[in-house]
Image: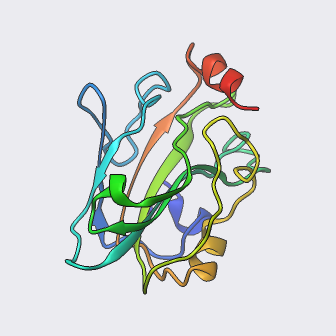
Amino acid sequence: MDSGGIIPDIIDSKPGAVAKVTYPGDVKVELGKELTPTQVKDQPEVSWEAEDGALYTLLMVDPDAPSRQEPTYREILHWLVINIPGNKVADGQVIAEYIGSGPPEGTGLHRYVFLVFKQEGKISTDKFIAKTSREGRVSVKTRDYIAKYKLGNPIAGNYYQAQYDDYVPTLQAQLK
C-alpha cells in the first residue's frame, strides 16, 4: 500500500494484513492489480483474520476523483459496513451500499481501497446511503471516519486499480 500511495493519501499507517477480496466469477483483488469496472460491478466477498466476539468496520473508497492527478473530490465512498461480527460482512450494518468502480472517461487509473478496522465497541447510527445515491459519497475522508468512530489503524486492507470501460455509463445512470 506504500508503493500505491495509499499512505499518506488516505491513511497514515499500513494495515497489518491483506484483506481477501473476491468478486463474482472468482475475480480476486491483488494489491494494485488492474481490474475493469465490468469485473467489479457486483458486491465482492471480503474476509480477514477476525477475533471471536469482535466487531469490525469495512470501508471502500476511491481517493482519485475526478482523477489521480487532480483529486479535488477525494475521497468517493463506495461501501461502508459497520458492526460486522467477526468477518461476516453480510451480518453487519450497511451504512453505504456497495457501488462498483465508475472512473470517468479519460481520467486514467483510479485506486479502489478496502480497509478493515477493529471497533472498540458497537457503533450506533441510523445513517444509510442507497446504491442509487451520490449524496454522502463525495469528498468523504477516511481519517474523519477513523476519528469519529475511534477506529484506530486498519487491521487489514487491499486495493485494485481501474479505468473507464463500457460499463461506466450504466453505473453512472443508476446514481441520482
Please tell me whether residue 125 is drawn above or below residue 39 in the rendered image. below
Q: Locate residue 57 relative to residue 64 in the image: left or right.
A: left
Q: Quadrant of the N terminus?
A: bottom left
Residue 86 lies, in percent from the top left, at: 26, 68
Q: Locate residue 3 relative to residue 76 in the image: left or right.
A: left
Among the 4 quarters of the image, the one containing residue 88: bottom left
Q: Locate residue 105 relative to residue 24 in the image: left or right.
A: right
Q: Nearer the viewer, residue 54 or 166?
A: 54
Among the 4 quarters of the image, the one containing residue 58: bottom left
- Asked if residue 105 shows in the view, the reply is no
Q: Locate residue 80 relative to residue 3 in the image: left or right.
A: right
Please report the residue visible at 23 percent of the width from the left and 30 percent of the height from the top: 26
Residue 123 lies, in percent from the top left, at: 52, 77
How is this picture coloured? rainbow
Residue 146 lies, in percent from the top left, at: 57, 76
- Asked if residue 84 shows in the view, the reply is yes
Q: In this view, which residue lies farthest toward the right?
A: 72
Please report the residue visible at 52 percent of the width from the left and 66 percent of the height from the top: 7
Q: Nearer the viewer, residue 69 or 114?
A: 114
Q: Quadrant of the C terminus?
A: top right
Please report the residue visible at 63 percent of the width from the left and 55 percent of the height from the top: 128
Please report the residue visible at 75 percent of the width from the left and 55 percent of the height from the top: 139
Among the 4 quarters of the image, the one containing residue 132: top right
The image shows a total of numbered marks equal to: 0
Residue 41 lies, in percent from the top left, at: 47, 28
Q: Nearer the viewer, residue 155 or 84?
A: 84
Q: In this view, which residue lies farthest toward the front?
A: 126
Please tell me whether residue 91 is drawn above or below residue 29 in the rendered image. below
